[in-house]
């Protein structure tokens, strides 16, 4: 791949990670970050819930609930970062900020 096409992708907001002969292309980074965060929240609460079935693992379950709760606080931070980022590049375009609010 040429350097010109890589520069064009990085300017268009596409993140490309090279993994050997493969490429991982990430578009809409804030959406991907928000989805990843939501999956982790669900995972922490699911595993924590299962760990409450045994008295021996109740402490680990409690910690997983704390981690899940912290990640729930991260979600609005991701949304705020997305809004601030969009404001910087599109200061007069309110529809870009409200569309697909994750």
Image: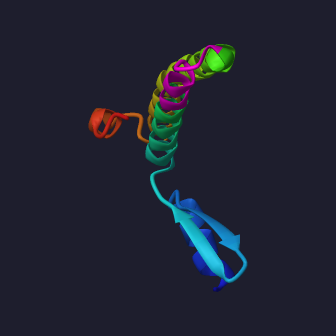
Residue drawn where x is 63% and y is 78% of the image: 22
Q: Residue furthest right?
A: 20
Quarter location, residue 96: top left
Please state if 96 lies on the left or on the right of 86 as rendered. left
Quadrant that contains the N terminus: bottom right
- Give the image's coloring scheme: rainbow
Residue drawn where x is 51% and y is 27% of the image: 50
Looking at the picture, does residue 5 appear above or below residue 10? Answer: below
Inspect this view and state whether residue 92 appears.
Answer: yes
Residue drawn where x is 41% and y is 40% of the image: 90
Q: Magenta residues, as a range? A: 46-55
Residue 38 in the image, given as x and y percentages of width and height: 46, 35
Please state if 17 lies on the left or on the right of 46 as rendered. right
Quadrant that contains the C terminus: top left
Q: Nearer the viewer, residue 79 or 36?
A: 36
Residue 72 in the image, given as x and y percentages of width and height: 50, 21
């Amino acid at each position: 791949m040429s350097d010109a096409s890589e520069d064009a992708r990085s300017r268009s907001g596409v993140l490309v990670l090279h993994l050997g002969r493969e490429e991982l292309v990430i578009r809409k980074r804030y959406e991907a970050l928000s989805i990843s965060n939501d999956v982790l929240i669900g995972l922490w609460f699911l595993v924590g819930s299962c760990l409450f079935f045994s008295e021996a693992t109740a402490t680990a379950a409690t910690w997983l609930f704390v981690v899940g709760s912290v990640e729930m606080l991260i979600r609005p931070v991701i949304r705020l970062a997305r809004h601030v980022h969009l404001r910087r590049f599109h200061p007069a375009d309110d529809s870009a900020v409200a569309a697909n609010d994750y």
